[in-house]
Each structure stands twice: as C-alpha cells, then as structure tokens.
Image (cartoon, grey):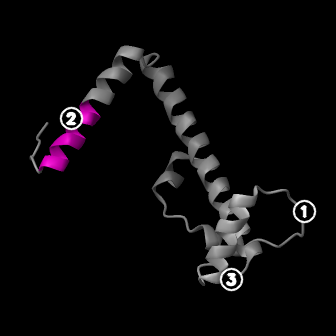
C-alpha cells in the first residue's frame, strides 16, 4: 500500500460488503458481545455478524494505515537519519502547546 492511500476516506462497511462472505467460529469476550448485541437492538447494526464484520474491516484498514505509516517513517529515516528521542520529546511538547492553545482559543502562527 502506498502513501497515497492514507489520504483516501475509507468506509469500513463499504470495504466489508465488497468482499465475499465466509462463515467462521470465533470466541469473543462476553462484554464485547453485550455491546454488539445492544448495537443491534438499537438499530446501529443489521446483525451481530455485520457488527463483527465491520469491526474486523475497520481493524484491517487500521493495520494497512499503520503499515503505510511505518513505511513512510522508514523512508524518512533512510534519507535523513533516525528520529531521536529528543526530537520526539520536542514534538510532544509542541503538540501539547498547540492543543492548549486550541483549548484556550489562542491563535498560533509558526
């Protein structure tokens, strides 16, 4: 998957419904089954199977995006060198400052 796919808006239900279906047996935590059943009862999902299918499709999309991101980071580091802990810490601080400014309604220009 190339970097261009990161910009596309993926819809898990469209992704899931475009594939052929296969019956399988899985073991799921009771609390997750309760949440899924509640979603079906509330009309938020057509069936328990469709709820699970959509969750799996969303996970597949997430995994593809993470793989693409890892590929981008590896390419960046190959060209510019490894991203250091100090650079990551500086970015975390900058992000925290930006988030605080947004919450306070302060305009930031960089």
Magenta segment: does it hold 15? Answer: no
Across and down, in percent, residue 9 comes to: 49, 64
Above or below — where is 83 with respect to 44? above
Above or below — where is 6 with respect to 15? above
Which contiguous range is marked in magenta?
Answer: 94-104
Q: Secondary structure at mark 2?
A: helix
Name the one closer to the observer, 65 or 71: 65
Which of the two labelled residues, at mark 3 and mark 1, occupies the earlier sequence position?
1
Across and down, in percent, residue 47 comes to: 73, 80
For the residues labelled 2 and 1, say whether their Cβ atoms are less than 8 Å apart.
no
Return the residue at label 3.
Answer: 46
Q: Residues within 10 Å of mark 3 (few under 14, many from 20)?
A: few
Q: Secondary structure at mark 1?
A: loop
Q: Using the numbered discs, state the Cα–Cα distance from disc 2 to disc 1 in whole angstroms.
A: 47 Å
Q: Is residue 22 left or right of residue 66?
A: right
Q: Quadrant of the C terminus?
A: top left
Q: Quadrant of residue 18?
A: bottom right
Return the residue at label 1.
Answer: 25
Tell me the tag on residue 53.
Answer: none
Q: Main secondary structure of the magenta part?
A: helix
Which of the two labelled residues, at mark 2 and mark 1, occupies the earlier sequence position?
1
Q: Secondary structure at mark 3?
A: loop
Residue at figure coordinates x 57%, y 48% from the top left = 65
Across and down, in percent, residue 17 comes to: 71, 75
Q: Quadrant of residue 56?
A: bottom right
Return the residue at label 2.
Answer: 97
Q: Quadrant of residue 37?
A: bottom right
């Amino acid at each position: 998957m190339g970097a261009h796919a990161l910009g596309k808006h993926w819809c898990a239900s469209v992704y899931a419904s475009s594939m052929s279906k296969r019956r399988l047996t899985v073991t799921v935590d009771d609390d997750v089954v309760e949440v899924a059943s509640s979603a079906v009862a509330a009309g938020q999902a057509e069936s328990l199977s469709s709820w699970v299918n959509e969750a799996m499709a969303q996970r597949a999309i997430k995994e593809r995006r993470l793989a693409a991101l890892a590929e981008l980071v590896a390419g960046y580091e190959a060209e510019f060198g490894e991203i250091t802990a100090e650079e990551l810490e500086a970015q975390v601080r900058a992000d925290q400052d930006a988030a605080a400014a947004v919450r306070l309604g302060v305009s930031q220009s960089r």
